[in-house]
Amino acid sequence: MSALPTLLYIHGFNSSPASHKARELMAACAQRGLAAQLQIPALHHDPRQAMTLLEAHICAAEGRVTLVGSSLGGYYATHLAERYGLKALLINPAVRVQRYFQRYLGPQQNFYSGERWELTAAHVEALAALEVPPPRDPERFVVWLQTGDETLDYRDAADYYRACTLEIEEGGDHSYQGFAARIPELLAFAGLLRP
């Protein structure tokens, strides 16, 4: 019997496994007896270290891996999905991040851990190096966008992922309102729940 799929949740910029969506996903998986299938690593702010950790999780997984990425996590998930041929569900994902992140250069603080750090040009260059062309196999990607995203322009992602399964909701915000209600869809996409 093959191992159950692994769901790898990738949080966003200055976020953590303590984020609202991550906690909702943990609770939903625990309620369904799927806690062991969910991995939510705490990512380092340096993209190179974050990517090393995520690749280690992918390589160590026993079953098939499905990626779920939020915001910057969606950018990381896209790179990894293309590199390893994985499925990915992206929530208000960042695209062409070097353009966005230039304006955030300087002191930062993680919203959950309180860690203080400095976003440098080297970090932005490392992020830019992870950019990939729009997905070669768009059937592996599902993208959830909300037009009320106050951090990222949803139209950038809508254009980049236009060949993928793209679901655009009016309103909402960057945190993606109504996420908890959509978790069963996410688990079905990962092969952990019957649709």
Image (spheres, rainbow, N blue to C red):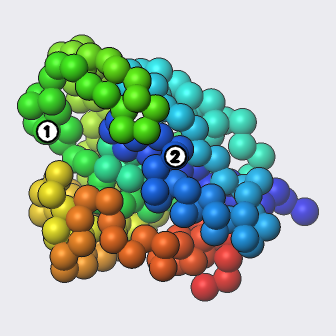
Residue at (72% x, 71% y) in the render: 31
Q: Are marks 2 and 1 in contact (CB under 8 Å)?
A: no
Q: Residue at x 48, y 79 (%)?
A: 181
Residue bearing mark 2? 18
Q: Measuring from the top left, give residue 70's x and y in whole percent.
A: 38, 53
Classify residue 21 as left or right of residue 60.
left
Mark sitting on residue 153: none
Residue at 24% x, 72% y is: 172
Please name the amino acid that badge 1 sits on.
Tyr
List the residue tagged with mark 1: 100
| Element under disc 1 | helix
**Local SS, label 2:** loop
Q: Amino acid at mark 2?
A: Ala
For residue 118, what is the image quadrant? top left
Across and down, in percent, residue 73 comes to 39, 45
Question: In the picture shown, does residue 108 fall above or below 190?
Answer: above
Nearest the camera: 192 or 101? 101
Q: Position of residue 164 (x, y in %)?
A: 32, 68
Q: Is residue 123 above or below residue 55?
A: above
Q: Residues within 10 Å of mark 2 (few under 14, many from 20)?
A: some
Quadrant where the N terminus is found in the figure: bottom right
Horizontally, residue 136 falls left or right of residue 95, namely: right
* Residue sticking out furthest to the right: 1
Q: Residues within 10 Å of mark 1 (few under 14, many from 20)?
A: few
The answer, for residue 188, to whether it is visible in the render is: yes
Q: In this rendering, does residue 129 appear at all?
A: no
